[in-house]
Image: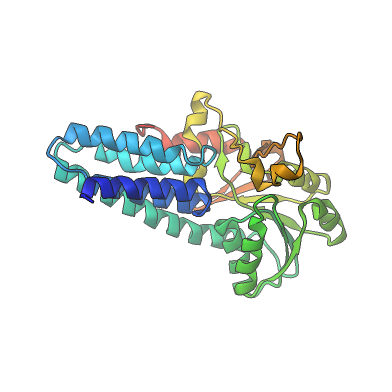
């Protein structure tokens, strides 16, 4: 297999891993897509830099379609392309693509560390906390709080249908956190009966009006939290904010295969609908916890303009 075909095979493999959720987490899929784009550049043969740039845009479009709700994926690819597209030689474009991809990967790792510190500072010793789905940023804040000596009791939802809550529970327990797994529909009962002090979750996308896109069930559980005056803290790296929403573009809600819920053969004639994200209004979010600091939902539009203003977007 020549290098061009090998590069294409790797690109398709990374896309499939993201689409199938073998590669999970908004930061991780952005990182892997960025590195795959660098690999695609390195496998390019020839001296036509215009052709290379066009190929990279097409490769980025292909990767971005793997998980339409994950704004981090699109932001990562645009981050890589922004300076690459100004290069006037093939070696320069290849080198810049690798440089930018590695810079994004470093940014992912550093952001989680900063968010962990800021998120932990919001939590107090002896509190009960509820989390939903799997977010390394949110889990990192809980782990950091315990590392600081705060005794937390964490309740982790199972998170149907893909059960990412099991990943969260293993991760927290492995770090010494007192964690209890619950079914999603027990969230309100636990919020009330266990006197939960805060809800700590992650994000897949945040749009300009401060709305949150996260795993299905988030809106329902945050609504329950709000009814009990339980604050909702969303741990979100800046690359999860959508600059495209400033232009009126809506975040797409991904719908996945019915078989993730039930084997259709078990329910002949029954339709199965499997949206895997929902949109939570800004009024149900207390604070966004970012690597840049705490952010109120009403301040998101200004934050996005400052963070992304003027940056070119290729996909």
Residue positioned 59% across, 47% down in the render: 203
Q: Is any atom of residue 23 visible in this view? A: yes
Q: Nearer the viewer, residue 18 or 69?
A: 18
The tally of labels here is 0
Front residue of 151/303: it is 151
Q: Position of residue 182 (x, y in %)?
A: 77, 60
Q: Is residue 97 visible?
A: no
The reply, left or right, for residue 8 in relation to residue 256 is: left
Instruction: Write the residue at 66% across / 62% down.
Output: 166
Coloration of the structure image: rainbow
Residue extending furthest toward the top: 248
Q: Is residue 194 above or below residue 18?
A: below
Looking at the image, residue 231 lies above or below residue 65? below
- Give x and y (percent) for residue 176: 64, 75
Residue 107 as seen in the image, left or right of residue 100:
right
Q: Quadrant of the C terminus?
A: top left
Q: Nearer the viewer, residue 238 or 72?
A: 72
Give the x, y percent position of residue 107: 40, 54
The image position of residue 134, as x and y in percent, is: 61, 56
């Amino acid at each position: 297999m020549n290098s061009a075909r090998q590069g294409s095979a790797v690109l398709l493999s990374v896309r499939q891993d993201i689409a199938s959720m073998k590669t999970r987490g908004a930061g991780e899929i952005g990182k892997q897509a960025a590195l795959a784009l660098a690999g695609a550049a390195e496998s390019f043969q020839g001296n036509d830099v215009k052709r290379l740039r066009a190929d990279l845009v097409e490769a980025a479009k292909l990767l971005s379609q793997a998980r339409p709700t994950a704004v981090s994926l699109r932001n990562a690819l645009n981050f890589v392309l922004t300076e690459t597209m100004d290069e006037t030689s093939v070696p320069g474009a290849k080198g810049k693509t690798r440089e930018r991809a590695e810079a994004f990967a470093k940014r992912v790792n550093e952001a989680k560390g900063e968010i962990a510190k800021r998120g932990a500072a919001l939590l107090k010793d002896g509190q009960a906390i509820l989390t939903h789905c799997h977010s390394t940023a949110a889990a990192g804040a809980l782990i950091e709080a315990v590392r600081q000596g705060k005794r937390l009791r964490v309740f982790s939802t199972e998170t149907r249908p893909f059960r990412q809550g099991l990943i969260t529970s293993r991760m927290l327990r492995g770090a010494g956190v007192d964690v209890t797994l619950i079914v999603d529909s027990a969230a309100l009962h636990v919020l009330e009966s266990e006197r939960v002090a805060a809800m700590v979750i992650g994000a897949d996308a945040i749009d300009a009006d401060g709305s949150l896109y996260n795993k299905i069930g988030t809106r329902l559980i945050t609504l329950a939290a709000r009814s009990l005056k339980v604050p909702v803290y969303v741990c979100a790296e800046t690359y999860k904010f959508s600059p495209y929403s400033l232009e009126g573009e809506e975040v797409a809600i991904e719908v996945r295969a019915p078989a993730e819920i039930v084997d259709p053969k078990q329910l002949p004639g029954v339709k199965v609908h499997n949206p895997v994200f929902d949109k939570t209004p800004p009024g149900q979010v207390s604070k966004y916890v970012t690597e840049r600091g705490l952010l109120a939902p009403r301040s998101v539009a200004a934050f996005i303009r400052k963070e992304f203003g003027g940056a070119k977007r290729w996909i």
